[in-house]
Amino acid sequence: MGRAGLRYALLHWPHTLSVIPKLRIESMRNTPLLILIFFLTACATGPDQFSKSMTNEFGLKRYDISSFENSNTKVNAAFIYTLLANTEELRIHQFNGASDNEVYVKNDMANGGYPEMVVRFDRDENGNKIDGTGKHVRDCENKGSFNYKHPQREPLGHFSQDILPWIKWGNCREDTTSREQRISAYIMDIELGLEHLAAERSNYYLPKGFNFQESGQSETIAFFIVALEKSNFDLYSFVISDQGSPQKREKFYKALEAGINKLFTGKV
């Protein structure tokens, strides 16, 4: 679910450009300057810039490789990375009762990112998908979008550059969902991912060479840690000893949802 950077600048430009008729452009000699301003404005709101802005906006700690000297940080980071790498986008594309929607993400990069498509299938009397009945979903709340980062291969960058802007602004200008509804839907996807990991008894991991240097890595780890701290939830203890309990996992989901909502309190 990609909603960051240049695309968001484009999304909001109709409001910004409404002031342009007030400008008097004397000649075509002004055109290069306007183009330059237009370009610089877009670059200033790019996906990497959005990731970096998270630190100040949400009061996040900055992590680097030395942060792993604290074993708690490494455990927490491995859990968050693994969880997000196994969180598929499903519920966030099923608003307004559209429970038959399925999401397909292009695995190979195209035009600098990973486009996705949402398809609705008819079901038989047993609820099974009927092949050949797929219809491209185009409604604002549920349609697919462009991801700057791959959801599974770059889960931390995907959260900071694609998911978080969507939580903040929605899918398009006509999106009727509230921020609270989007957070709730995302937590449902988080739950599906963690329940799958628990059923498989999967280990938590970080990719080889992970060092917090790539865009969104430090910001996303810090965002989740702070969100849980807002709910007084001890993530390290949960990962080490409690995540095998369904009741403890339920507390985790509630704490994370409440914490993310608290982080957005007062934000535009």
Image (spheres, rainbow, N blue to C red):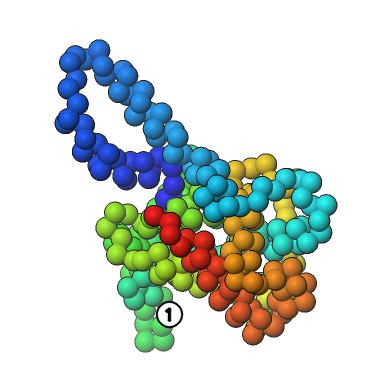
Residue at coordinates 76% horizontally, 57% vertically from top-left?
A: 74
Q: Is residue 38 visible?
A: yes
Name the residue nearer the viewer: 138 or 254: 254
Q: Is residue 152 visible?
A: no
| Residue extending farthest front | 266
Q: Quadrant of residue 71?
A: bottom right
**Quick one: quadrant of the C terminus?**
bottom left
Residue 100: x and y, percent?
A: 38, 74
User: Is 76 on the left or on the right of 16, as rendered?
Assistant: right
Above or below, 112 against 261 in this view is above
Amino acid at dot 1: Asn
Q: Quadrant of residue 245?
A: bottom right
Residue 235: x and y, percent?
A: 69, 69
Q: Quadrant of residue 137?
A: bottom left
Q: How many marks?
A: 1
User: Is 165 on the left or on the right of 152, as rendered?
Assistant: left
**Disc 1 element:** loop
Above or below, 262 against 246 in this view is above
Label 1 Cα crowd, 10 Å radius (few <14 / some 14-19 / many 20+):
few
Residue 22: x and y, percent?
A: 17, 30
Residue at coordinates 70% horizontally, 58% vertically from top-left?
A: 77
**Quick one: quadrant of the N terminus?**
bottom left
Name the residue nearer the viewer: 151 or 71: 71
Residue at coordinates 60% horizontally, 43% vertically from top-left?
A: 215
Above or below, 95 against 43 in this view is below
Name the residue nearer the viewer: 104 or 210: 210
Residue at coordinates 59% horizontally, 57% vertically from top-left?
A: 223
Residue 98: x and y, percent?
A: 35, 73
User: Residue tagged by mark 1?
Assistant: 128
